[in-house]
Image: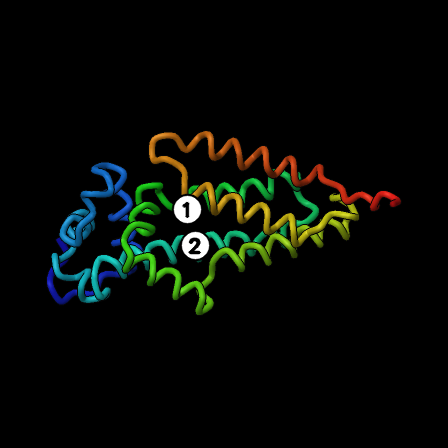
Amino acid sequence: MSPRGVAIPDLRDRLFTAAERVVARDGASALTSRAVTDEAGCAKGVLHTHFSGLDEFISQLVLDRFARSARHAQQLTGRAGQGLVADNLAEVALALLDSLPAAVVSLAMTRPGASLHTRQALEAGAPGFTAMQESIVGYLEAERHLGRVAQDIDAVTTALALVGTVHHLLMTRSPGDPSDARQTTERLVALLLCERSHPARPS
């Protein structure tokens, strides 16, 4: 247990990681402020010192993981010309899919306060799905310039389809079986990279 009054390095991430462990081990219903601080080895009141309550804490956990996924996606453009395009895209998509346990996502969606906090932060510009889409667009355009994807690929629509679908899978997958969502994501990447635009048929 950390002594009272002593600063704890990386406290937020320590609490977030502890919350994920509690949910993974005991289920979403077990996530309380006391359970988080006990798991993190912190004084029981420390969560409420840094967050207005459990709803804001859950929201900030979700936003932190989305921001981490957005930073991961930002590295894509620097990987243009390296490895397989499908593998690079799948890695970023699967990182988003795995960014949060399904039970934490369920809490964030079903607790109105947490949902409101998250939505307001994203609308205010917190790093999230829009940032991920922009990074994927930049990466696809770089790969198109190198001739590694089709010249007629619609980078904007491809990025929207990929991030939008993974977002949907993240929000709806069941805690017990994440494997199907991963397989769907990998199949989607392969499908999107095979798509080509076609000239309009003459009327």
- Horizontally, residue 134 falls left or right of residue 109, namely right
- Horizontally, residue 178 falls left or right of residue 156, namely left
Write the residue at 56% across / 35% down: 186
Q: CA distance from mark 2 to mark 1?
A: 7 Å
Q: Secondary structure at mark 1?
A: loop
Write the residue at 79% across / 48% down: 151
The reply to whether discs 2 and 1 touch (Cβ–Cβ < 8 Å) is yes
Residue 147 x %, y %: 78, 46
For label 2, count other residues whose C-alpha is less than 10 Å away and answer few (under 14), some (14-19) or many (20+). Answer: many
In the rendered image, the quadrant that contains the C terminus is: top right
Q: Amino acid at mark 2?
A: Phe
Front-most of 1 and 89? 89
Q: How is the image coloured?
A: rainbow
Residue 174 x %, y %: 36, 35
Q: Which mark is residue 66?
A: 2
Residue 96 x %, y %: 47, 46
Please determine whether, in this image, residue 118 is positioned above or below residue 29: below
Q: Which mark is residue 161?
A: none
Write the residue at 35% across / 47% down: 105
Q: Amino acid at mark 1?
A: Ser
Q: Quickly name the residue at label 1.
A: 99
Quadrant of the rendered structure where residue 11 is?
A: bottom left
Front-most of 7 and 16? 16
Which residue is farthest front? 203
Write the residue at 77% across / 49% down: 146
Q: Secondary structure at mark 2?
A: helix
